[in-house]
Image (spheres, rainbow, N blue to C red):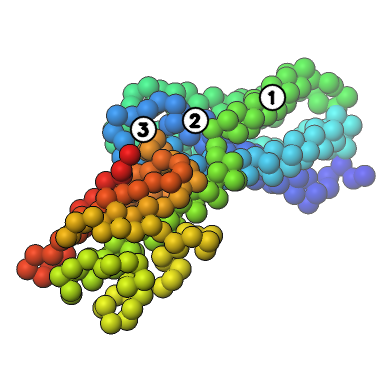
Amino acid sequence: MAKHDSAKYAFLYLLSLVALVFMSISVGIIVFQIINKQIVDIIKDYAISYNDGAMKFAISAIIVSAPIYYLTSRQIFKNLFAGILDKDAGVRKWLTYFILLVSVVVMIGFLIATINSFLGGDLTTKFILKTLTALAISGTVFSFYFYDIRREEVQGQKNKTISMYAWVSLAVVAAVFVLSWFFVDSPVETRNKKIDREVVNNLYEINSAVINYYTLNEKMPEDLATLMNTETGYRLSEKALQQPDGKKYYDYEVTADDEYKICADFLTSNLDGNDAMYYPSGDYKHDKGYQCFSQKVSSANGEKTIPAPVMIK
């Protein structure tokens, strides 16, 4: 095999670089999200909070990128050891220094993001831990490739430092990957939360219909079926009056001249406040199971108001 197969080694180096970027950034995202979840901010609605979607993206990226990175790197170092790829080959030097440049850029990006979060009100403890994480990831990548490009002897030399970097980094990536599963919602839990979000959306839609009916008729609708009548001024579909599985209608009861109670079944609880991506409004706080809400409606001078619903315990 030719020693200067530039196209092949350019492909291997660039593929390993792309995989390395995805893998290192994903490790950082996972650690950042664990920090966000474990260190609770008294400001519940603070923007820099735990994001389950970001965790799932990072897990997915590691599953794909980590094997690609370690396999391509193994192929590169195997060819260096065998002398098939010359240590002074231009493709090796150029692309290794390019990887060093990318590692510095990633480190700068991480640090800018953490400093921006800190200046935006993030906790000092979070800032310190995230900064250390960013420096550790980028510093490891930079020091590894800087050491590799400065090696004098490559062909036929089994380098313990290179092996140590490889095994330790693999262990860290594997540990972070395993740890992430203790914090991220399972696919079943995620689906259940999305189903509960549909329930909440239905409750909002029903409440808007009730208010509209009350405004036009100066009385509460007797039942949910009334809201499906086009003559009431606000026609709801039958789907909006049912649980997402279509097996049961929401329980509705008029409790006062301008108040009603509505009940629904929920598969999860959103009382912990960690589900902003599923419940952005913050209303209809509920526990798991059958939950009821007392909702007051009113209309004054033609203006409709929607007081927040109250969960009935």
In the image, farthest residue toward the right = 1
Q: Which residue is mark 1?
A: 171
Q: Which residue is mark 3?
A: 115
- The disc, 1 or 2, on the residue closer to the chain's N-terminal end is 2
- The disc, 2 or 3, on the residue closer to the chain's N-terminal end is 2
Q: Residues within 10 Å of mark 2 (few under 14, many from 20)?
A: many
Q: Position of residue 306 (x, y in %)?
A: 21, 58
Foreground disc of the pair 1, 2: 2
Disc ID at residue 36: none
Helix, strand or loop at label 2? It is helix
Residue drawn at point x = 28 percent, y = 33 percent: 43
Residue drawn at point x = 33 percent, y = 29 percent: 41
Residue 84, image quadrant: top right
State the separation of the CA atoms marked 1 and 2: 18 Å
Amino acid bearing label 2: Ile
- The disc, 1 or 3, on the residue closer to the chain's N-terminal end is 3
Helix, strand or loop at label 3? It is helix
- Relative depth, front residue between 6 and 283: 283
**Where the C terminus falls, by quadrant?**
top left
Disc ID at residue 34: 2
- Relative depth, front residue between 114 and 192: 192
Whether residue 157 sits left or right of residue 104 in the image: it is right
Foreground disc of the pair 1, 3: 1
Q: Residues within 10 Å of mark 1 (few under 14, many from 20)?
A: few
Query: In the displayed structure, would residue 44 be above or below residue 230?
Result: above
Amino acid bearing label 1: Ala
Amino acid bearing label 3: Ile
State the separation of the CA atoms marked 1 and 3: 29 Å
Helix, strand or loop at label 1? It is helix
